[in-house]
């Protein structure tokens, strides 16, 4: 027997079969080894990496020997001479010829994407979904396999959505309602399930129930995340309330027959429109179907096609005139939903893989530029190009508008093997995501980034991602996870001699120590980090200014007001020189607090008034609340009461624990 007789299934409890016979997998450790090899089928996984997965990043001294024993146990468990795992160097590889339900699942999805007839796409999606036994790996993955499990789960959910979409297009609205209701109940914040259920109910003449689904989703979204439904879902709700006849362009009634129009019926019409295009417009039409972007701007189209902006403008105008693209917002275009499969089929006949890479590199450069405008810290490896964002607001608007497409690009880049984009883009997005409603989305993207750096074997890049992830966990109050990721990041930087990275990791560990009340430890870590940053050939003045501010905050919390004022005053001056108002307004708030405690009330008030003004201009509600709370201690009673009430309102809206403390102080006043 050879490896082709072996199958490994991971879309549910992990299973191993040889020639149809089940092999017993004894224990979570051997299952984690097999899961890691399955996710990387055909690729060598180093023993050290397997050890991290098996022991959640804390392998024992005997980990290498134990991993080898686990692999040996896997081989022996087959009770047959079947070389399905091979040893290469210091790692192991699951042979590509081994059968895999994940590979079969992805093959069905790929076939569905390129199918020209909806019934063929539906069949392939149904076959893919029949393989799902969930949860992935039976839930034994552990933190270092969770990213892969999350990616597979997302592909399953998307396949479900696409299959139900085809059900609705085929007119099976009533049959879909029960399934969609269960899906929405299970995943109440997944918007596309909500949208599909609303459409199915509306098409079944259950308009009030469709509206009720929207109202319930809007309430849940506001309560759980403080967000509103997307503009598209709100527009769908409005159309349902108006009773529009064009509720679903894909299943609109044919005026002659009164029957649903299947996309396949329109293929000859699409072909005629396509053949009438110039070669430049036809090429752009094909390329737009090769990437998961839903709102192409003109610069994005130019980079996708490798054309001058003027030529791209002419091509998109031609496509618009031919009704092959839809303008979703001023200056933003997408293929009409019915045309995606048609364009994808044509693109498959003349593939241009460099086009997506070119576009993704541009998206990464733009995001890095926006990130630097939001927080002017150095981005390792970023291309030094003139920033396209002249103001902080313009960078914020661009990130908010493009975020959904950027997130889709990260996933597509990882799945297509563009690991450089898959790790750099999430790291660049953190400055924006840390500001508000996309924090949870970022955690999902960060897992793709970690996997991409490991597939590249780039340990310094992995350290950069883990450091961002650790900082995110710290801000979310998940201190154990933050400590784990930041400690790993520091170790990776030390291993490759990246002193700047190690200094940044120390700074983040100091912030974590500060958050957990370890003020002396924070001071020690920041002192070491600052010394490392100052000792290089080109001192990192931005990071040194952040260390200075951190030292001031730690001394303030520790009760050394004199040292706090000294460090914070130096940090404020440095932030001003570096034009970093984001960090500057918070540091100035701390300086005001320290000066007030030192008895310098007038000077404290001056800094706090400036901090409040800057926080409002930056739309930084938490710092605005902190500045108001501190300023209230330096002004007359009447204004102080108003400032405290406003600060309390802001803390409450942010669900910040300071609201409880301030509310109690106000009640005792």
Image (cartoon, grey):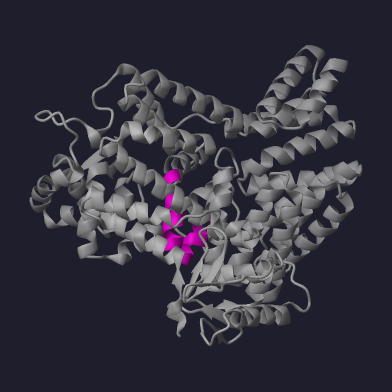
Pinpoint residue 375: horizontal percent, then vertical percent: 59, 48
Residue beneath the point at 10% across and 48% down: 268
Q: Quadrant of the C terminus?
A: top right
Up the image or down, 240 lies above or below 597; here it is: above
Residue closer to the observer: 480 or 385: 480
Choose between 454 and 318: the one closer to the eye: 454
Does the magenta segment cover residue 411? yes
User: Which region is colored magenta?
Assistant: 404-427
Q: Position of residue 388 (x, y in %)?
A: 42, 48
Q: Quadrant of the N terminus?
A: bottom left
Which residue is at a point 12% across and 28% down the rendered structure image? 255
Q: Is residue 365 visible?
A: no
Task: Kindly tell me whether residue 252 is visible in this rendering.
Answer: yes
Q: Is residue 668 magenta?
A: no
Residue 613: x percent and y percent? 64, 29
492 w.r.t. 197: above or below = below
Q: Name the chief secondary structure element in magenta.
A: helix
Q: Is residue 65 left or right of residue 116?
A: right
Report the residue that reaches farthest toward the top: 638
Q: Residue at x 52, y 67 (%)?
A: 39
Q: Which residue occupies the foreground of this view, 507 or 263?
A: 263
């Amino acid at each position: 027997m050879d490896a082709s007789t072996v199958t490994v299934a991971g879309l549910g409890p992990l299973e191993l079969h040889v020639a149809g016979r089940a092999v017993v997998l004894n224990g979570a450790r051997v299952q984690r080894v097999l899961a890691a090899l399955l996710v990387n089928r055909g690729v060598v996984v180093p023993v050290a990496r397997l050890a991290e997965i098996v022991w959640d990043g804390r392998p024992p001294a005997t980990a290498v020997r134990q991993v080898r024993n686990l692999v040996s146990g896997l081989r022996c468990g087959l009770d047959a001479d079947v070389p399905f795992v091979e040893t290469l160097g210091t790692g192991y590889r699951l042979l590509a010829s081994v059968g895999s339900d994940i590979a079969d699942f992805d093959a069905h999805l790929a076939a569905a994407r390129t199918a020209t007839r909806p019934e063929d796409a539906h069949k392939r999606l149904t076959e893919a979904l029949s393989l799902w036994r969930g949860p992935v790996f039976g839930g034994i993955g552990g933190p270092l396999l969770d990213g892969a499990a999350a990616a597979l789960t997302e592909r399953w959910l998307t396949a479900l959505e696409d299959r139900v979409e085809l059900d609705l297009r085929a007119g099976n609205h009533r049959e879909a309602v029960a399934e969609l209701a269960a899906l929405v109940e299970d995943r109440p914040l997944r918007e596309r399930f909500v949208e599909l259920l609303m459409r199915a109910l509306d098409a079944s003449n259950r308009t009030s129930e469709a509206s009720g689904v929207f109202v319930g989703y809007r309430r849940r979204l506001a309560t759980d995340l403080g967000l509103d439904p997307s503009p598209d879902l709100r527009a769908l709700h409005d159309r349902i309330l108006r009773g529009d006849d064009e509720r679903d362009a894909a299943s609109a009634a044919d005026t002659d027959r009164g029957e649903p129009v299947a996309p396949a019926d329109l293929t000859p019409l699409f072909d005629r429109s396509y053949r009438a295009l110039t070669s430049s417009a036809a090429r752009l039409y094909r390329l737009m179907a090769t990437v998961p972007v839903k709102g192409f701007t003109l610069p994005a189209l130019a980079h996708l096609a490798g054309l001058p902006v003027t030529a791209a403008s002419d091509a998109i105008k031609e496509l618009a005139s031919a009704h092959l693209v839809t303008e979703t917002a001023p200056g933003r275009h997408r293929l009409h939903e019915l045309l995606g499969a048609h364009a994808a089929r044509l693109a498959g006949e003349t593939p241009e893989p460099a086009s997506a890479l070119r576009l993704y590199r541009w998206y990464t450069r733009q995001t890095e530029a926006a990130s630097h405008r939001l927080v002017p810290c150095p981005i390792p490896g970023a291309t030094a190009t003139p920033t396209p964002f002249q103001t902080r607001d313009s960078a914020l608007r661009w990130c908010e508008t493009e975020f959904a497409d950027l997130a889709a690009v990260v996933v597509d880049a990882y799945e297509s093997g563009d690991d450089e984009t898959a790790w750099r883009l999430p790291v660049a997005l953190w400055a924006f995501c840390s500001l508000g409603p996309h924090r949870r989305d970022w955690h999902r993207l960060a897992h793709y980034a970690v996997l991409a750096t490991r597939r590249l074997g780039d340990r310094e890049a992995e350290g950069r991602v883990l450091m961002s992830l650790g900082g995110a966990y710290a801000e979310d109050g998940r201190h154990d996870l933050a400590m784990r990721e930041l400690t790993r990041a520091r170790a990776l930087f030390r291993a490759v001699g990246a002193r700047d990275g190690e200094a940044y990791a120390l700074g983040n560990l100091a912030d974590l120590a500060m958050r957990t009340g370890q003020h002396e430890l924070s001071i020690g870590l920041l002192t070491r980090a600052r010394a490392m940053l100052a000792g290089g050939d080109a001192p990192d003045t931005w990071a040194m200014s952040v260390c200075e501010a951190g030292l001031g905050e730690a001394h303030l919390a520790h009760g050394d007001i004199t040292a706090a004022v000294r460090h914070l005053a130096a940090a404020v001056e440095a932030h001003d020189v570096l034009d970093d108002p984001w960090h500057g307004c918070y540091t100035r708030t701390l300086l005001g607090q320290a000066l007030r405690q030192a008895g310098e009330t007038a000077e404290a008030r001056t800094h706090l008034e400036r901090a409040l003004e800057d926080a409002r201009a930056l739309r930084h509600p938490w710092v605005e609340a902190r500045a108001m709370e501190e300023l209230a201690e330096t002004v007359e009673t009447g204004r102080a009461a108003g400032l405290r009430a406003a600060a309390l309102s802001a803390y409450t809206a942010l669900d910040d624990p300071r609201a409880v403390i301030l509310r109690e102080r106000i009640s005792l006043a």
